[in-house]
Structure formats: C-alpha cells, structure tokens
Image (cartoon, helix red, strand yellow):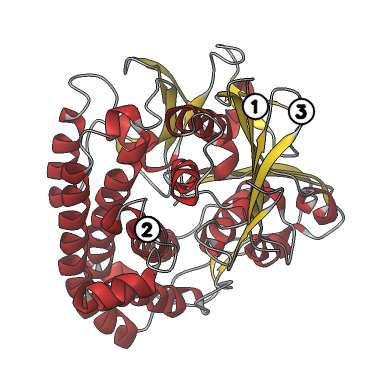
C-alpha cells in the first residue's frame, strides 16, 4: 500500500481539513472523524475595531460567500446602533443576497458536486471536474457557467463589487440601484429562470440515477434549523425554527435570543466547535442547517415554482423530514429556483430603485445580533461595543459549524459502508469526500487560515499504525 499516497491538484473542497479512519485488526472501520485543524482567530482580532468597519472587514472571511458576512454584519450593526433601515434598503440587501444564492448554489452543484454525480464516484479524477463536464456536455457546462455569471454580475450591480461587496452599511445602503441596472437584471433573471429549471432537471435525473444508493449513503436522523417567515422559507430575515427528528415543531425564537437556545461544544481533536440545541443537550441536540435543514423546517415557499418543488421534495420523506444527505443537492437547486423567482419579484417592485436607501446611525454603546441564511446555512454575527463604537466582543457562528457534527457522522457512516479489509482506493476515498461535499462546507469561513487548502485522509490501524494517507493539496 505504501506509507503515503498523494493526489494533486486540490479539488472540490473549499478550505482545509483532514479525515482520520481507524481500522480494527481485520482492516474494517471502527471510527472516523472529520478534522478542522487550523486556528480560527477572526473573532479575536476584530476586537478593538470600530463597529461600522465590520461589514467590510468580515467579507474577507470568505471569497465565495462574502455577501452573507457582509449582510449579517450590517444587520448586527443596525441592531447595535438601534436603527430601522428604509424599505428600499432592505429590498436591495435581499436582492444582493438572492444574487449570491444563485451564484453559490450554481457553483457548488455544477462545479463541485455534479462531477461525482454525473460521471459516477468511480470515474477518474481527471474527469471529475467542471472541465470534464464541459468536455462531455459542452452545452450544459456553458449554461452552468452562465448561471453563475448572472449571479456574480448581479452582486456587483447591487453590492459595488462582485467579490467583497461594500454597499451595505449601518443604516441601510450606500447607493441606490440605477434604472439601467434594474432593466439589465430583469432580463438576466428571465434567463436565469430557464437555467434554474435546467439545473432542476439535472438534479432530478441524479435522484433517479442514485435512488438505490441515497438511502444507504449517510442517511440518519437529526433535528433541523432555519429561518422562516409565517412558516415559509426565509433567507434574509425572519425567526429561527427548530424541528425534531420526526418533523415536530420544537421551538421558534428571535435570532437575537440565539444564546438561550444554542450551545457550543469543543473536542480536543479539532478547532471548530459543535453547536447544538441547548435544551436537548449533547449529542441529542445535534441539528442540521443549509438547504436540507431549511426545507425540512419550512411549511411552504412564497414563490410558485419553488413551492411546487417543495411539495415534491417533502414527499420523499413520506410525512417525515427528508434525512438523506445526498438530497442536499436537490434541496439546493430548489433554493436556487426560489432565489431567481424572488430576485425577479424584488426587481419588479418600483421601490427597488428608490433613492431613500439610508438613515443616519449615531455611535453608541450596545449589543447587536445579525442572522442570515447563507448558502451553507444559518450565519450568526454578534457584536458588543462601547460608547465610542469600539468592539469589545465578537461572536461569529458560521454556517459550516452548525453542520459539523453531521458531517463528522456522515464521514464515519460512508467510511464504514465502502472501506473493507484495508482496501484503500481513490474511488472509495472519493465517496468519503462526497459525504462532505453534500453539505457544501466552507472551511475557510470556519477556520480563517489563509493560503492552505489541503484535504487529508488517513487510514489508521487498530494498533495506531498509519496504514495509508491520501492528501489533496500541499
């Protein structure tokens, strides 16, 4: 087998982590863990900064979902400074957020997940990438790129930049949307709607192709959490809802009260924390977020096409929550469809080009919480500042952290399923990675380590000897 196997280049994991798989004397899996090993210090070095700097500083946490941090920070600043932003500003922020959902969900589905699903986990690594999709199906590949491009261009029009936007400020937005940009975006959203329908068709083909594998591949019961508004799916603003493993409503609470309902646990083998439902305790309180979690807690979707798909999605659970990890991809595309529909609704509202987009915000001592549904799940920003506006404490619970316990469990279950008798082959290890990719983790958000993006899987014998290592990246 050899001591070390190296596979390059870095492929479809955003960030840096390690999987350890422990084997018994017969070479079968006894225990596996998904490790996030780099130090997370973003909260600490934000202390001492001025609160109004946070919407710009925190976008640097991530280059894939900077809009989420930008808006969560702006909402926390509004709350801390006690301001109510104008209706047009709220609509512009939501429009920017929908644009990011389009960009991010298209990116993950077509660039990161689809190569496994379209070609199969046993396909060669050279084929399992977006270039492989372009070679095998140029029309589909180009349409996937175009869908992401529409989302990215829309972010730039509303946010001022396509990456690390700057327009959301305490008190609203720094600039209105021009009539010209509104017109362009409306035309592009019509195009995006057709592309989202195409993506939905691909997702359903995948569901059918893997219908025998899906129930066996990291399928387990957890609780679920997400924002809702009047019971409907909500991505920008609402109340947090938690449902239990059987779909029963457990709690609904205002995001600012999250500390009364969510606790965090630490383990000595990883730097990332494990959030859980406080009243249920650990580990019974483990819950899932992101598309699967959001659709499981929502009763309906406010836009017609996505709502029809939600009804079809819920039938997969037979009256229970949909538990199978591979259905994250289907749920993600339903949200993509909703984001396009909702973006078009916002653009058709004449208030979207109002010039009344900000109110004054005076510095003061206070505490503020901003919560938003990022593409990868519920994102929480919590700030405390003195009377000069200087930050004394920052707490950020990133989306990936909420799903960490479930990703760890998914890795273990898939490793047990596919690895037998010390047989270590790249296609089998790729299935372990597929379990992680279901959750679309952003490990850069979780750890904030710049410049290193390896994924390492170790096979460890029962006596502690490392039987093999496979590493992506350096």
Task: Name the front one of labels 1 and 2.
Answer: 2
Outermost residue to the front = 1
Is 327 placed above or below 51 here?
above
Q: Is 53 positioned to the left or the right of 191 in the image?
A: right
Q: Quadrant of the C terminus?
A: bottom right
Q: Is residue 133 above or below residue 269?
A: below
Q: CA distance from mark 2 to mark 3?
A: 40 Å
Q: Nearer the viewer, mark 1 or mark 3?
A: 3
Q: Where does residue 11 sit, x and y in percent of width and height?
A: 52, 62
Of residues 359 and 307, the one drawn nearer to the viewer in this rendering: 307
- Per the image, label 3 sits on a secondary structure element best described as loop
In what element is the residue under mark 1? helix
Determine contact: label 1, label 3, CB under 8 Å.
no
> Which image quarter: residue 109?
bottom left
Q: Quadrant of residue 384?
A: top right
Residue highlighted by disc 1: 259
The residue closer to the viewer here, 384 or 371, is 371
x, y percent for residue 209: 18, 45
The CA span between labels 1 and 2 is 29 Å
* Residue at 55% from the left image edge and 44% from the top image edge: 399
Mark 1 → mark 3, Cα distance in angstroms: 39 Å
Q: Is residue 396 left or right of residue 87?
A: right
Find residue 346 and name its label: none
Marks 2 and 3 close (CB-CB < 8 Å): no
Splitting the image into 4 quarters, where does residue 71 fall? bottom right
Circle 2 — which element?
helix
Q: Mark 2 sits on what residue?
A: 105
First of labels 1, 2 by sequence position: 2
Q: Residues within 10 Å of mark 3 (few under 14, many from 20)?
A: few
The residue indicated by pointer 3 is 464
């Amino acid at each position: 087998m050899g001591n070390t196997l190296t596979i390059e280049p870095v492929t479809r994991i955003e960030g840096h982590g390690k999987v350890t798989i422990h084997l018994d004397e017969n070479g079968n899996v006894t225990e596996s863990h998904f490790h996030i090993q780099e130090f997370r210090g973003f909260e600490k070095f934000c202390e001492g900064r001025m609160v109004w700097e946070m919407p710009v500083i925190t976008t640097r946490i991530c280059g894939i979902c900077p809009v989420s941090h930008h808006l969560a920070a702006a909402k926390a600043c509004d709350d801390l400074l006690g301001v109510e932003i104008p209706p047009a500003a709220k609509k512009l922020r939501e429009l920017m957020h929908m644009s990011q959902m389009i960009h991010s969900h298209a990116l993950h589905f077509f660039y990161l997940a689809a190569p496994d699903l379209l070609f199969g986990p046993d396909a060669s690594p050279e084929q399992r990438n977006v270039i492989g999709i372009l070679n095998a199906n140029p029309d589909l590949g180009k349409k996937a790129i175009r869908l992401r491009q529409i989302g990215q261009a829309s972010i730039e029009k509303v946010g001022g930049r396509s990456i690390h936007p700057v327009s959301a400020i305490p008190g609203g937005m720094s600039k209105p949307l021009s009539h010209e940009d509104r017109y362009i975006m409306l035309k592009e959203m019509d195009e995006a709607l057709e592309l989202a329908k195409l993506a939905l068709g691909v997702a359903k083909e995948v569901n059918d192709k893997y219908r025998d594998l899906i129930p066996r591949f990291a399928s387990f019961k957890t609780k679920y959490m997400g924002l809702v508004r009047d019971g409907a799916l909500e991505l920008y603003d609402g109340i947090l809802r938690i449902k239990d493993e059987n779909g029963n409503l457990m709690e609904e609470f205002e995001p600012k009260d999250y500390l009364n309902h969510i606790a965090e646990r630490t383990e000595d083998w990883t730097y990332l924390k494990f959030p859980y439902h406080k009243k249920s305790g650990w580990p019974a309180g483990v819950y899932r977020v992101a598309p699967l979690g959001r659709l499981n807690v929502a009763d309906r979707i406010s836009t017609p096409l996505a709502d029809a798909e939600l009804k079809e999605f819920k039938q997969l659970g037979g009256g229970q929550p949909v538990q199978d990890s591979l259905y994250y991809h289907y749920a993600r595309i339903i949200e993509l469809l909703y984001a396009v529909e909702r973006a078009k609704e916002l653009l058709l509202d004449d208030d979207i080009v109002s010039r009344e987009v900000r109110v004054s915000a005076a510095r003061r001592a206070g505490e503020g919480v901003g919560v938003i549904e990022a593409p990868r799940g519920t994102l929480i920003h919590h700030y405390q500042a003195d009377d000069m506006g200087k930050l004394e404490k920052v707490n950020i619970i990133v989306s990936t952290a909420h799903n960490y316990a479930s990703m760890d469990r998914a890795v273990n279950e898939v490793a047990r399923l596919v690895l037998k008798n010390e047989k270590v082959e790249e296609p089998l290890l790729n299935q372990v990675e597929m379990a992680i990719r279901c959750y679309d983790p952003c490990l850069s958000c979780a750890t904030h380590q710049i410049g290193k993006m390896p994924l390492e899987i170790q096979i460890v014998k029962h006596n502690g000897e490392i039987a093999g290592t496979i590493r992506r990246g350096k």
